[in-house]
């Protein structure tokens, strides 16, 4: 049967780049995993093998490292914008560039009392420990006219040890789960949020400040919501972000329920007064939803793993 070429892209995936900014004795780290995907007039390379319009993926890799030196890395978003603009504006066959970035965060190691008198500070200025809280992510797409920036995080594990219930649900002959009026609520947050910044003429957000503020509102909503369901908590987290950050129009969360079950201690003559739990890793409930500013159409992919 005759065939035609559908949507396609190519590039170099997972370019690990670590940029050290040296401010005297104080160093700053940006640790990124950058994936480049380019699309445009690429029919012939598929149909005939002609590479006339193909910028080598090795070149895209080299560009990542060169731009880390030339432009520095102020933020993952800003770095991705530099890259996307370069690929679309410097190569006529390339019509769209998509840059996906994971950022691994580091924090300084505190100096011991014995050593602090030698370095004159409360922390070692060039020694770091990898943060285990979350991985920051962003995706920048540019088609020569409009930008789309979707940022977020993954693997942020949070827990409320009380102020959570789950009862009043549908029951059938297969239901064995007892109703809970005081339970642990824990999840591993994967979240994405879409900015309403679309072109160079508009005021560009402060990417670093925006990330910190979004995370703050997200965590405050999780902590302050008396939860009757994980869905309710998810909606409050997204609504808090939309209501407090005017630069964001859409938030999508994927929240696996990290189940904690009370252990039956009665066989040992002990009462378990919401103190001892079994943490189950699987199977788990998976709660997902998108929260939008009123009047906005959703554009964040449902499957966050493909972002």
Image (spheres, rainbow, N blue to C red):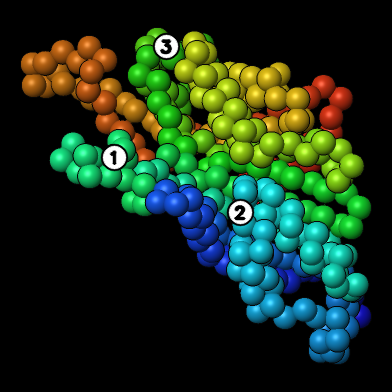
Labels 1 and 2 touching (C-beta < 8 A) = no
| Tag of residue 73 | 2
Circle 2 Cα neighbour tier, 10 Å, few/some/many (<14 / 14–19 / ≥20): many
Residue hosting label 3: 163
Comparing marks 1 and 2, which lies closer to the viewer?
A: 1
Q: Residue at x 73, y 61 (%)?
A: 83
Q: Is residue 178 visible?
A: no
Q: Nearer the viewer, residue 22 or 293?
A: 22
Residue that carries the numbered disc 1 in the rendered image: 120
Looking at the rendered image, the disc whose residue lies closer to the viewer, 3 or 2, is 2
The tag earlier along the polypeptide, 1 or 2, is 2
Q: Residue 255 in the image: state x and y as whole percent.
A: 53, 34
| Helix, strand or loop under label 1 | loop
Pick the front one: 304 or 268:
304
Tell me which corner region of the image, top left, top right, bottom left or bottom right, holds residue 39.
Answer: bottom right
Crowd class of label 3 (few under 14; some 14 to 19; many from 20; radius 10 Å)? some
The N terminus sits in image quarter: bottom right
Give the spatial CA distance, label 1 vs label 2: 28 Å
Q: Earlier in the sequence, mark 3 or mark 2?
A: 2
- Of the numbered discs 3 and 1, the one sitting upstream in the chain is 1
Q: Are marks 3 and 2 in contact (CB under 8 Å)?
A: no
């Amino acid at each position: 049967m005759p065939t035609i070429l559908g949507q396609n892209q190519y590039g170099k995936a997972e370019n690990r780049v670590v940029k050290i900014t040296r401010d005297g004795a104080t160093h700053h780290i940006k640790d990124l995993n950058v994936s480049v995907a380019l699309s445009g007039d690429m029919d012939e390379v598929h149909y005939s093998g002609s590479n006339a319009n193909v910028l080598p993926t090795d070149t895209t890799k080299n560009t990542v490292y060169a731009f880390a030196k030339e432009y520095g890395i102020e933020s993952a978003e800003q770095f991705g914008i530099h890259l996307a603009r370069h690929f679309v504006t410097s190569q006529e066959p390339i019509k769209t560039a998509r840059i996906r970035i994971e950022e691994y965060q580091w924090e300084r190691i505190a100096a011991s009392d014995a050593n602090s008198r030698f370095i004159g500070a409360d922390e070692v200025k060039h020694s770091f420990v990898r943060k285990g809280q979350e991985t920051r992510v962003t995706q920048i797409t540019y088609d020569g006219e409009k930008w789309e920036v979707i940022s977020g995080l993954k693997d942020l594990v949070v827990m409320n040890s009380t102020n959570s219930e789950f009862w009043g649900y549908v029951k059938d002959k297969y239901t064995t789960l007892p109703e809970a009026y005081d339970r642990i609520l824990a999840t591993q947050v994967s979240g994405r949020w879409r900015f309403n910044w679309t072109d160079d003429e508009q005021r560009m957000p402060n990417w670093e400040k925006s990330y910190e503020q979004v995370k703050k509102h997200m965590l405050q909503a999780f902590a302050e919501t008396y939860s009757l369901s994980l869905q309710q908590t998810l909606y409050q987290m997204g609504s808090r972000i939309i209501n407090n950050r005017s630069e964001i129009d859409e938030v999508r969360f994927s929240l696996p329920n990290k189940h904690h079950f009370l252990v039956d201690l009665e066989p040992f003559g002990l009462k378990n007064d919401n103190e001892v739990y079994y943490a189950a890793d699987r199977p788990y409930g998976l709660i997902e939803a998108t929260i939008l500013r009123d009047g906005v159409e959703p554009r964040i992919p449902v499957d966050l793993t493909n972002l």
